[in-house]
Image: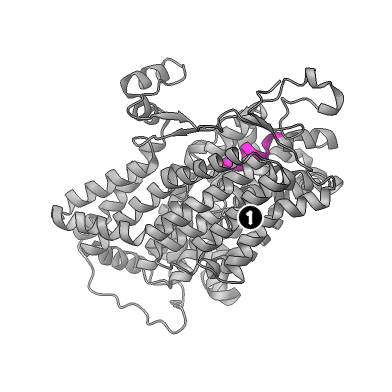
Amino acid sequence: MTPASSWIQVYDPLGNAWLSTAAAALPIILLLFALGVLEWRAHRAALAGLMAALSVSIFIYGMPVRLAAATAIYGAAYGLLPIGWIIVNAVFLFNLTVATGQFAIVKSSVAALSADRRIQALLVAFSFGAFIEGASGFGTPVAICSALLMGLGFAPLYAAGLALIANTAPVAFGAIGTPILTLAAVTGIPATTISAMAGRQLPFVSLIVPAWLVITMSGWRGLRGVWPAVLVCGSLFAVVQFAWSNAVGPELVDIVGGLVSLVGLAAFCRVWKPREVWEFPNVSRPLLGAALARPVVLRAWMPWVFLSIAVILWGLAPVKAFLNGGPSGLSTYRAGKAPAVSTLLSPTWDVPLLHHAVFREFPVEPAAVDRALVSDAAYKNVRAEAARYTLNWASATGSGILLAALLTALYLRVPLREAIAIAGMTLTRMRAPLLTIALMLSLGFVTRYGGTDATLGLAFTRTGVLYPFFATMLGWLGVALTGSDTSSNVLFGSLQKITAQQLGLNPVLIVTANSTGGVMGKMIDAQSIVVATASTGQLGEEGRILRFVFWHSVALAAIMGAIVMLQAYVVPWMVP
């Protein structure tokens, strides 16, 4: 039996599936309504959503107050590190390049390659964004690419919106394949099998997204003007995504695909130019000055080279093992054991009151037994939910970005006093976004530990023959709720497998759909919206950005759902 201080989740607290689902959805609906309709500032909307989530979890789902409070604090801490730490340092690096005048040279070099805004969006938001996603994830590509686009002269709304839309197709293989590897661990399906299945779904979207970006900017007429560049950009990434995921594995799909797409498109643009250079309406076309010397351009791009190298290194398992455990961590990793963790480099605490105090129920947790089938005395196989907070200050991706920023300051010979001033200015401007991120993550954690997310997920399992489509939408919902494809896979991966087996569907297809459908929810999750807002200086405009990307997210998720339906019933031979 579980300890007296523990709590077992319930998924139909009102005794009616429809009413319980409506109650579970209330905090999310309130959050979206406050952001998109009432146009509240993000931190106010997040606070309202958090209060609603706490009320639903405590008064309807019966979650003990002490557990609810601990969960909210736990989520807020996770929002500050690692998420907030990434954003602060990415913006710090960007501010350094602006203050030293190097970003102006970067803009000129990109404009010299192509002054066409459509091609700039493909280069930065899609290709470079995919590379950064593969190396880091956790909102890093949105922060960096939206800041780059705005620096290039894009309107803040479009800089944020395009970066969010582009951050879809690569996400399942992001952070050195973490979502796929996590999904494999949760479901027991080999990672290579899930990788191969994802590589037979996402390339179709990878062909669509570059065109989608261009149409969003300039309409169908604008697409006709640059379709060769769109085809090169999307097809290069899609081919690598399919081939690498099926022949090698999930770890380097985005890094290799992003680089191939970026280099290939840049080379193509040297021999091909659109007939007309497209610019946003009512925006003057940037003037191209004299050609810059190669050493000058290389110097201006070095901060971004530092950034790329840092996020790649910080994503490698041996480096993480060393940064978390020092030499002993690396030696145990090389020996094939679980890497040792240093209490200095990566101190970990069990969250008071919460750790191993919340239990998921059947069928969300497959290790549990159905209480209706056994006596209370036999009900003992329920797995407790862990709640450990790790202050991995050395191995956090944000620390790698900070190192890149410090190397940038040294390389560009920024005086210490000026560097400190830029850092202080960055922190001052990031106060509101950091508060919002903490509140948003707090809301997400309360929905998870309170069980309301599982209620929403179970609602999708009642769709019968249409389940392949709604399995995709369940992944979309999971990412929209948690802000992470990895977290969505942890949340719903086992449920997807159980439901597929009950309905006679292929578990590999359905489980993978959770991740590949989930990536389309990345552009509307609160965490990503706040990251884009912070990096483009649009405080208070979160609702506007949400409205800009929401229907793009729904439409792309529906397209992925249609692909999964076809693979389930029309072309099942595509499933490995």
Q: Nearer the viewer, residue 206 or 161?
A: 161
Q: Nearer the viewer, residue 319 or 430?
A: 430
- State the image coordinates of residue 34 (x, y, percent, origin top left): 60, 66
Q: Nearer the viewer, residue 279 or 39?
A: 39
Q: Quadrant of the N terminus?
A: top right
Magenta highlight range: 486-494
Picture layout, residue 77 above or below residue 39: above
- State the image coordinates of residue 377 (x, y, percent, origin top left): 79, 18
Picture layout, residue 553 above or below residue 24: below
Q: Quadrant of the C terminus?
A: top right
- State the image coordinates of residue 573 (x, y, percent, origin top left): 76, 38
Query: Dividing the picture into quarters, in which one does residue 8 lie?
Result: top right
Q: Residue at x 38, y 40 (%)?
A: 312
Query: Dividing the picture into quarters, in which one does residue 543 lie?
Result: bottom right
- The way the protein has been coloured in the rendering is one colour
Q: Nearer the viewer, residue 352 or 240?
A: 352
Q: Secondary structure at mark 1?
A: helix
Horizontally, residue 489 falls left or right of residue 340, namely: right
- State the image coordinates of residue 270 (x, y, percent, origin top left): 38, 63
The outermost residue toward the bottom is 282
* Viewer can see residue 204: no
Q: Residue at x 76, y 31 (%)?
A: 362
Identify the main secondary structure in magenta.
helix
Amino acid type, residue under disc 1 in the picture: Ala
- Magenta stretch holds residue 208: no
Picture layout, residue 176 above or below residue 107: above
Which residue, given by chain and number where applicable, does mark 1 sit on? 52
Q: Residue at x 64, y 29 (%)?
A: 6
* Viewer can see residue 419: yes
